[in-house]
Image (tube, grey):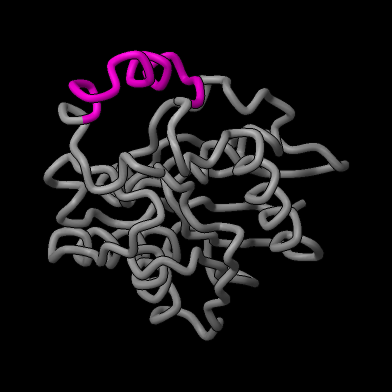
Amino acid sequence: MTVLVLLRHGQTEYNAEGRLQGSLDVPLGEHGRNQAAAAARAIVDGYGVPDRIVTSPLSRARDTAAAVGALVPVPVTVDRRLRQRSYGEWEGLTWDEVKLRWPRDYERRLRGEDPQIAGWDVAAEVSARVSEALAEACDGARLVVVVSHGSAIMLGSLALLGLDAHATTLGKLPHAHWNVLATAHGGWSLARYGLSAAAAD
């Protein structure tokens, strides 16, 4: 059996301002660093020492993963496939700005569909690359901690669970929260959802 802890990075200043980050490399803010430290302690206390810690290359995820790595004798490995999807020409904008300038594509996004804008990473492609990275990270391991991004975690999880990339079943994972997937006999299941350091206390 493999237990996979999927941790979303801590909050950035862009997150606090409601700006879309996507592929932009925005660092953690002070609150995000505190969130990362608390989440790391809760995960290690709750699950023990992981066999592997794997992270997106973006600094907000790497620094969150480093908080976990600081508590255990396990190196942090970077996998580019775990990066956040690109939001194309929406990156750096607020949702209000997006709604004003691209009303139809904004509505498509609200329905869980891919907007038809330049540079957007479509769900099916993100789902495929993230799930591939997750499966490889878990190969032969008992416990794996992966640090990534909201959309990337959701889309990769949907693929492992055999669900459509446009399904809204898993909703939105808050910053420094984590989901737990488990596998036995070749199939994945969602064991826990939306956990946080506060919930673990």
Q: Looking at the rendering, which quadrant does residue 100 occupy?
A: top left
Is residue 103 shown left or right of residue 165? Answer: left
The picture quadrant where one finds residue 185 is top right
* Residue 111 picture location, percent across and down: 43, 14
Q: Toward the viewer: 185 or 171?
A: 171
Numbered range of the magenta stretch: 98-114
Which one is nearer the viewer's eye here, 201 or 122? 122
Of residues 88 and 9, the one drawn nearer to the viewer in this rendering: 88
Predominant SS of the magenta segment: helix
Q: Is residue 3 magenta?
A: no
Tell whether 47 sits left or right of 30. Answer: right
Residue at image point 50% right, 57% down: 83
Residue 46 at x, y = what percent?
A: 45, 57
> Which residue does the image show at 70% across and 43% down from the upper left?
128
Residue 66's place in the image compared with 33, above or below, is below
**Vertical side of 4 occupied by 80: above or below:** below
Q: Position of residue 20 (x, y in %)?
A: 28, 43
Residue name at image x 28 percent, y 56 percent: 10
Q: Residue at x 57, y 76 (%)?
A: 77
Q: Is residue 59 left or right of residue 123?
A: left
Residue 106 forms part of the magenta stretch:
yes
Please provide percent x and percent y for residue 94: 18, 36
